[in-house]
Amino acid sequence: MPKQYALSINHVSKTLGGQKRINDMSIHCEYGQIYGLIGPNGSGKTTLLKLITGLYQPDEGEILAGGLDPIRNYKKVRRQFGLLPQDTALYPELTAKQNLEFHGALYFHNMKELAQRIQEILTLIDLKERQNEPVKRFSGGMKRRLGIGLALLNDPQLIFFDEPTLGVDVHNSHRIWEYIRTLKAQNKTVIVTTNVMSEADHLCDKLFIIDHGVKSVKVHRMR
């Protein structure tokens, strides 16, 4: 029986605007590992994330998340995903708790379970004491941590962090790194896009390098 990966990308290609953004790419991600995705701006990292999450359909090849196609089985697959985008999607006038409640309504039907999960997340991201403050008062690091909380709220198996420490100071960057490292111990699969080599070195078990229009991918074992 073939091995089932957390994420399997098999000979995938995608053309956008007349340019081949992803070119015959194959990547296999195991459970309980942290992967780095690194490359210059415009190399195709964001396109790849959109393909994995089912926002784009590949022109060629196959993508499987937990053995499921993200297009044909989008409801099941999206429940497995957690995503921290570059631009953290927060409502500044709402409190941290209210932001989590709004997001959690997409996944939870039992409000008691949601309330319990929100308190667990607030504790994890160290914002429990500030949960009733409007997000507009938060620092960049606090907003980024809340964004991580949103990504983890539905207890996903496959988690994407797009530039997780973008605009965050050194102290908070290290705190965010530690949050991400704890996910590996829970047997979750994490993919981090970053242009910071020190971040990739600290976090990642393996590093995928997208080079020059996604013409080649190199894999390095970081640990």
Image (tube, helix red, strand yellow):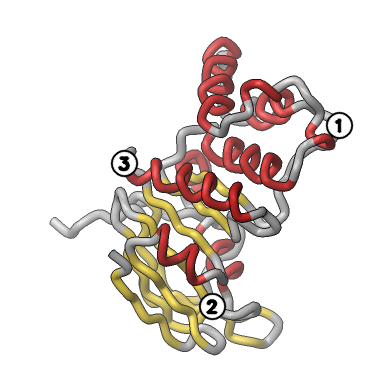
Say which label, 3 or 2, has the lower sequence index. 2
Q: Percent position (x, y) of residue 157?
A: 40, 42
Residue 97 in which image quadrant:
top right
Q: Which residue in the structure is indicated by mark 2?
A: 39
Q: Which residue in the structure is indicated by mark 1?
A: 93
Asked if labels 1 and 3 touch by Cβ distance under 8 angstroms, the answer is no
Q: Say which residue appears at 47% left-offset and 42% top-offset.
A: 179
Q: How many marks?
A: 3
Q: Secondary structure at mark 2?
A: loop
Say which label, 1 or 2, has the lower sequence index. 2
| Amino acid at circle 2 | Gly
Q: Percent position (x, y) of residue 107?
A: 57, 29
**Residue sitting farthest toward the top:** 112
Q: Which mark is residue 185?
A: 3
Q: Percent position (x, y) of residue 130?
A: 70, 24
- Cα distance, mark 3 to mark 1? 35 Å
Q: Which of 66/150 is in front? A: 150
